[in-house]
Amino acid sequence: MTEEVEDHPALLGLFELIGRLGAEGYGGVELAYPHLKDRSDEGLAELRRIAGLAGVELNSLLLDFGEPGTADEVRHDAEMALYREWIDAAAKAGFRRVRIGAGEGSGDSEAAFVRAAETLVLLSAYAEHAGIRVVTENLGSLLGSSDRVLRMLSDTGGKVGLTADYGNFKDDKYRQLEEILPRAETVHAKAREDGGGQLDSMDFRRCVELTRKTGYAGPLSLTYLGEGDPWIKLAEMRELSAIGSASFKLL
């Protein structure tokens, strides 16, 4: 299979970004797999070294590809090989986790759900030997509701963790977040715009308060995808959340 990566101009090089995050006092970062352009042993070792020097933990590598619930055996085998390659790369670079979505199978597809659970368990077993934790997310139609997320965690028997994302539920967002946040190991604290180019602080603050109510003590990855200077927006979010770990896409 081939990988398709969208072309976006990088505002900072990867090592520059990590250095600045450390200088700004952020304790960690999540990266998407296209950011690791050099997967040689030397390149991954250098990423580990730079992150260590900056005091920035490599929290998660986001593997935004694949369809774990596919019924196509050829596709499944090819994607499994690709997932294993990226898990190996994550381990060499020093990431603590890889995040793998359950896929875009129909939300009511029982067979796709079962296959996705089985695939995630297999990948978890592989990753465990490398010291990597596999987590999934309330992402895509297959895990588009809190009950489906909770069932996935149950069906995978604790072998797969959860990243909860503030911005992914389409309906009844706060209720559904409240149901999954107690099971989260990482949180994507995503802020949206208010329609006038400003950060929607009311929505963001409410999501953070829901997270606090659960007693969550893991990394809070600040993510802002709107307009404006991202460092200013991240600082605003950091002030609102008073928790200092950041996720920042190099777009």
Image (cartoon, rainbow, N blue to C red):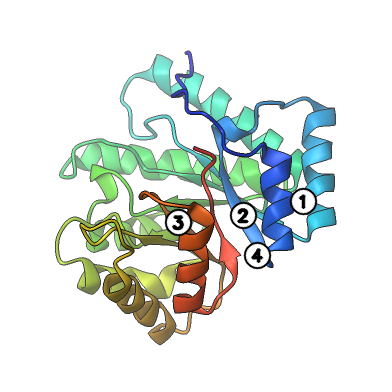
Q: Which residue is mark 2?
A: 29
Q: Which residue is mark 1?
A: 51
> In this orientation, which residue lies closer to the viewer: 37 or 152?
37
Disc nearer the start of the sequence (1/3): 1
Instruction: Give the structural element (helix, strand or loop) at label 3.
Output: strand
Amino acid type for the residue under numbered disc 4:
Tyr
| Disc marking residue 223 | 3
**Amino acid type at image mark 3:** Thr
2 relative to 128 in the view: left or right: left
Q: Residues within 10 Å of mark 3 (few under 14, many from 20)?
A: many
Residue linked to disc 4 = 26
Q: Are marks 2 and 3 in contact (CB under 8 Å)?
A: no
Amino acid type for the residue under numbered disc 2 = Val
Q: Quadrant of residue 194?
A: bottom left
Residue 83 occupies quadrant: top right
Assess whether mark 2 and mark 4 are in contact (beta carbons under 8 angstroms): yes
Q: Residues within 10 Å of mark 4 (few under 14, many from 20)?
A: many
**Dot 2: what SS?**
strand
Query: Neighbour class for label 1 at 10 Å: few (<14), some, many (≥20)?
Result: many
Q: Is residue 179 above or below residue 49?
A: below
